Amino acid sequence: MFNEAKRYIPGGVNSPVRAFKAVDGTPLFIKKGKGSRIVDEDDKEYIDYCMSWGPLILGHAHSRVIDAVKKALEDGTSFGAPTRKETELSRLIVDAMPSIDKVRLVNSGTEAVMSALRLARGFTGKDKVIKFEGCYHGHVDSLLVKAGSGLVTLGDSAGVGNDVIKNTLIAEYNNIDSVKELIKSYKDKIAAVIIEPIAGNMGVVLPGNGFLEELMEITKDNNILLIFDEVITGFRVGYGGAQGLYKVKPDLTVLGKVIGGGLPVGAYGGRKEIMEQLAPVGNVYQAGTLAGNPIATTAGIETLKILEDKSIYKELKEKTNNLTNSIEKITNENKKMKNDLKINKIASMFTLFFNKDEKINNYKAAKQSNVGMFAKFHKEMLRNGIYLPPSQFESCFLSAAHSEQDIEVTVEKVDNVLNNVENHPS
């Protein structure tokens, strides 16, 4: 199937990391999913910790979401005209996130980031943007510099000219002084700072104590817009996203993944005076034929309505702690792996870093990981029926559908693999 796909699709995949190049393997072709499990075209079943890279917080094919989508399909797939469902999903987002007064729906996280940057430039009248090493914000030309996700292993993209990135400035994650230096060097020229408030694209990397708060203050003091890319963390780490956890209010927020309930969607929102610079009210243009389409909004609405029962987040955190604490115990008891495997986690997100560093809190530390060892581990976990994201530099995700039995099986398989896998040069 992979050879057949390569005849018609570049590399045989429609998103590079799916090719398993980072783990020296051949991708599985998935036939179906239900709950915490996926089944490939050879009818082999796996416990899934990728969860479509994060959106499926309720698990695969949740009955309420599927039933709602089936019903919506009977009324049509797209109209290119306003629907009540767009308003309903937008209201749920605004009610959940105090930093957002108004929101614009689009079709992907990349599209949302691209649009938010244009809006920031239009609102401030300035051109430069600060991003952070290892943070990935979709395949927007100007941000494909020292980005995370697949670019960590594949390298920066060709086709992105110097004229495109000349206004992109690079800071170090968790280093507020690097931000201050850039602001000092480019005073009154910086439109926005964009950041993953919890990094998920160099593996899970958490903000240090006070880092986001200082970032909010310094941007406010210098008339710079602060943009949180919560495509991964929005409605994933809590109903109010990372900004709800850390009590920090950005000027603009970018969303995706969970708000589409497994269907393609993106959104960006923020303060009223900024958002009303968008056409047709203001003069910052952005449009999309399928934006806010009734099928994606239906899936998103149903998902967020279920998540309004915030006890789900408590259960997800407990499951994640149970899983990761058990793996840490195994690691500490394993003479071969002791001090070689670190776990960064928050809520229902975690990354197993094959890394000797004491603390993995930025891109440079994450890059020290032993990718060869991860590739070997990934291959053996697949063989044991556990599906992990095929890159050392991605987050694993739990869902509400993962059971205690799933976790027990996973811990048993990790123990078995770590005891049998041979060490691999970095």
Image (cartoon, helix red, strand yellow):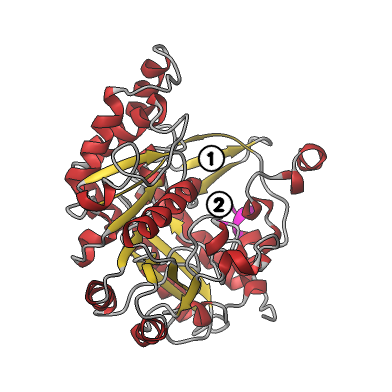
| Residue at 31% across, 36% down | 303
| Pointers 1 and 2 in contact (C-beta within 8 Å) | yes
Q: Is residue 91 magenta?
A: no
Q: The C terminus is located in which quarter?
A: bottom right
Q: CA distance from mark 1 to mark 2?
A: 8 Å
* Quadrant of res 89: top left
The stretch in magenta equals: 381-389
**Left or right: residue 135 compared with residue 24:** left
The residue singled out by tag 1 in the image is 38
User: Could you tell me residue 163's position as x and y percent?
Assistant: 61, 67
Looking at the rendered structure, the secondary structure element under dot 2 is strand
Check the image and report above or below for 160 versus 79.
Answer: below
Check the image and report above or below for 363 versus 77.
Answer: below
Residue type pointed to by label 1 = Ile
The residue singled out by tag 2 in the image is 387
Looking at the rendered structure, the secondary structure element under dot 1 is strand
* Quadrant of res 329: bottom left
Q: Earlier in the sequence, mark 1 or mark 2?
A: 1
Q: Is residue 383 magenta?
A: yes
| Residue at 65% across, 71% down | 421
Residue type pointed to by label 2 = Tyr
User: Could you tell me residue 184's position as x and y percent?
Assistant: 36, 86
User: Could you tell me residue 252's position as x and y percent?
Assistant: 30, 56
Check the image and report above or below for 240 versus 136.
Answer: above
